[in-house]
Amino acid sequence: MDSKVHGIENSLSCPVIYSTVTYATLFVEIVLPFLMWFRAARPYAVAMGISLHLWIMIAMTIPVFGILMVTTYIAFYRDEELDEGLDWIRKPIALRPARVYVDGDCGLCMRA
């Protein structure tokens, strides 16, 4: 029997990788609630939680669960911290002001 199913390797062919991912998932699930309560450890906990739930979204194709779990992390942040985080996200993708060139002879362009 072919060890590949639809281009993805069968889980029986890589038991070390899958057992490592399983124990890493258990570790994150146990440690995450405790780390979220400490402000200094919170960014690391959120990074671990997001990576875990992205893995669940991709590997198990359960997108709603992953999105729901990631959005629950917002409750652990103060308004100031959320504003700083949103500014950090918005800064690289901020829209630049558009330049508009107007032909002086066009009446419609001048009114606009």
Image: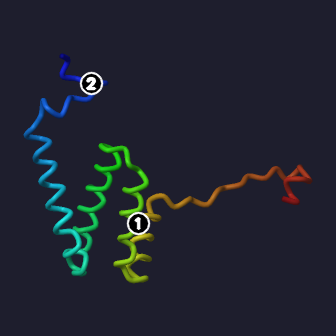
The residue lying at 34 percent from left, 78 percent from top is: 76
Q: What is the distance, in whole Å, between disc 1 and disc 2 at their CAs?
A: 33 Å
Amino acid on which the number 2 mark rests in the picture: Val
Q: In this view, does 27 lie to the left or right of 106?
A: left
Q: Find disc 2 in the rendering and name its residue.
A: 5
Q: In this view, does 40 lie to the left or right of 17?
A: right
Q: Which image quarter: residue 30?
A: bottom left
Amino acid on which the number 1 mark rests in the picture: Thr
Q: Quadrant of the C terminus?
A: bottom right
Around disc 2, counting alpha carbons within 10 Å, would you say few (fewer than 14), some (14 to 19), or many (20 or more)? Answer: few
The residue lying at 39 percent from left, 77 percent from top is: 75
Q: Find disc 1 in the rendering and name its residue.
A: 71
Name above or below for residue 33 compared with residue 4: below
Q: How many marks?
A: 2
Q: Are marks 1 and 2 in contact (CB under 8 Å)?
A: no
Q: In which quarter of the image is the N terminus?
A: top left
Around disc 1, counting alpha carbons within 10 Å, would you say few (fewer than 14), some (14 to 19), or many (20 or more)? Answer: few
Name above or below for residue 7 compared with residue 91: above
Q: In this view, does 103 lie to the left or right of 41?
A: right
Percent x, y of residue 80: 41, 83
The residue lying at 18 percent from left, 34 percent from top is: 11
**Residue at far top of view:** 1
Name above or below for residue 74 compared with residue 79: above
- The answer to which of marks 1 and 2 sits earlier in the sequence is 2
Question: Helix or strand or loop: what does disc 1 sit on?
Answer: helix
